Amino acid sequence: MSGRMHRGWHGGGRGRGPGRGGWQQADLPSTDDAAAWLSGRLPDGWFVGNPDVTVDREEIVIVGELPPLDGEFADTEAGRAERAAAISGRISRFREQTRDERIDIARQAEHRYQRKVAWGARIGDVVELFTTASVPVMTRLRQPERIVLDTLVDSGVARSRSDALAWAVRLVGEHAEEWLGDLRDAMAKVDELRAQGPTGEGS
């Protein structure tokens, strides 16, 4: 069975290769089979069902659902605190017990797909990501955009311009997920048509 894969736009699985401007897009292998490969490679019993696999140019993030907690917790402040502590402990146990094997799987996946691999675990609505990549992105902003970032910094929403920019990107992602998904699907279709080339008569 193949797992679920979410994709940041990266040109149908291609990324950037070595060069003055970073990596050239054609140099990274496709990640189209990454979810299927990981679902086959992961040990049985680690997760409930297949993990969510999110891919972009630099990183593959694997987040799996852990079995639910045993017992019930009172719907009180103390009960919710106990539940949060139990979830944190369960995820911590999984992280420690699987560390060596996760490192081995990540090493294989990094060799196969030429991207860093990060892990996470979910119990119910709680998701905890382990070490993930923080990738610098260079951009030039005109004064109106800089003023927006500085307003976020001055109001205490963000600590710095870079933090404000990351906050703005997260906000767009939260409120435009459906639109971004449609955009990625459309761009993937364009990439498929480009790879096929012209096939009509008289071409």
Image: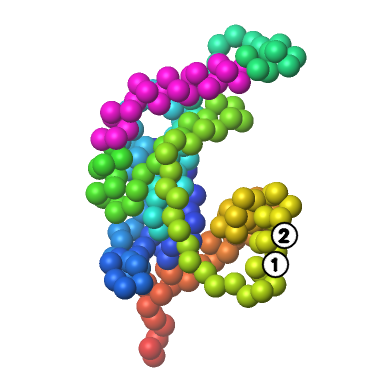
**Residue 98 colored magenta?**
yes
> In x, y percent, where is residue 130?
44, 35
Residue 148 picture quarter: bottom right
Is any atom of residue 74 visible in this view?
yes
* Nearer to us in this view, 150 or 134: 150
Whole-Å distance between the Cαs marked 1 and 2?
A: 6 Å
Question: Residue flagged by tag 2: what amino acid is it?
Answer: Thr
Location of mark 2 (residue): 151
* Nearer to us in this view, 37 or 131: 131
Q: Residue furthest bottom?
A: 202
Residue name at image x 70 percent, y 72 percent: 144
Horizontal side of 5 relative to 110 (left or right) equals: right
Horizontal side of 131 relative to 175 (left or right) equals: left
Residue name at image x 62 percent, y 14 percent: 82
Horizontal side of 46 relative to 101 (left or right) equals: right
Q: Which residues are magenta?
A: 83-104
Question: Residue flagged by tag 1: what amino acid is it?
Answer: Ile
* Nearer to us in this view, 184 or 109: 109
> In x, y percent, where is residue 1?
39, 38
The residue carrying pointer 1 sits among few (fewer than 14), some (14 to 19) or many (20 or more) residues within 10 Å by Cα, namely few
Locate the C terminus and report the quarter of the image it occupies: bottom left
Tell me the element at label 1: helix
- Label of residue 117 in the image: none
Q: Main secondary structure of the magenta part?
A: helix
Residue name at image x 34 percent, y 48 percent: 116
- Label of residue 147 in the image: 1
Looking at the rendered structure, the number of numbered marks drawn on it comes to 2
The residue carrying pointer 2 sits among few (fewer than 14), some (14 to 19) or many (20 or more) residues within 10 Å by Cα, namely some
Do tag 1 and tag 2 residues touch (Cβ < 8 Å)?
yes
